[in-house]
Image (spheres, grey):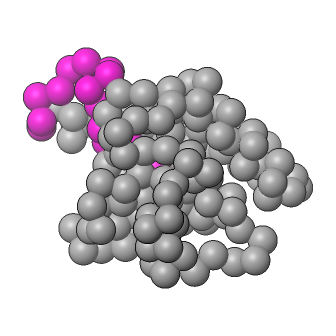
Amino acid sequence: MKSPDILKKMWVSIFNRRGGSGTYTINSDEIGGSLKEWLRNRLSLKSSELPVIIGFKTPKKWFVLTTERLVWELENKITELEVSKIKDATVSLVLENTKGVTKKNEFSFLKIITFDDEYTLEVESGNPHIGLWNLLKTIAASNSKLTN
């Protein structure tokens, strides 16, 4: 197993190469004081856990990918997944079609498939969506190698 520091560097690199930051989705090293403080208060990070990518639109609509978990809040519901349980990530075409979205750079919903359930995550469209999608697929591929 790779150290949290190495995982973070690898994952940030994948996110940046395959998509990248946006208006409210950034590498955790780029966050400022008040958001960093909010993150510390909202998310109880374990001593071995590092924040990697953060999407913060409002205090009720955000996500954080750490080296151990994916946590998000949407519609007053907080969802938390261990990254080791991610089996696949794909575009939620049903939700995109409902919104009338047909262009890849306008997609904002990801379907995250774990070994026992499915979840929907809304993220910033464009580069952040594409970068996070590719990063989650990379994590899923790594998880499948560990389970085989």
Q: Tell me where residue 95 appears, x and y as whole percent.
A: 21, 41
Q: Tell me where residue 5 appears, x and y as whole percent.
A: 81, 54
Q: Confirm whether residue 65 shows in the render.
A: yes
Look at 46% across and 49% down and name the residue there.
Answer: 112
**Which quadrant of the figure has residue 91?**
top left
Give the residue at the far top of this rendering.
Answer: 103
Is 147 on the left-hand or right-hand side of 2? left
**Which quadrant of the figure has residue 13?**
top right
Is 68 on the left-hand or right-hand side of 125? right
User: From the image, which quarter does the N terminus lie in?
Assistant: bottom right
Q: Tell me where residue 61 appears, x and y as whole percent.
A: 29, 61
Q: Does residue 65 sit above or below 144 in this rendering?
A: below
What residue range appears in magenta? 98-113
Between 144 and 82, the one lying in front of the other is: 82
Look at 50% across and 65% down and name the residue there.
Answer: 33
Q: Confirm whether residue 146 shows in the render.
A: no
In the image, is residue 109 part of the stretch drawn in magenta? yes
Look at 21% across and 67% down and name the residue there.
Answer: 75
Q: Does residue 6 sit above or below 22 in this rendering?
A: below
Is 100 on the left-hand or right-hand side of 20? left
Between 145 and 78, the one lying in front of the other is: 78
Q: Tell me where residue 69 appears, x and y as whole percent.
A: 60, 64
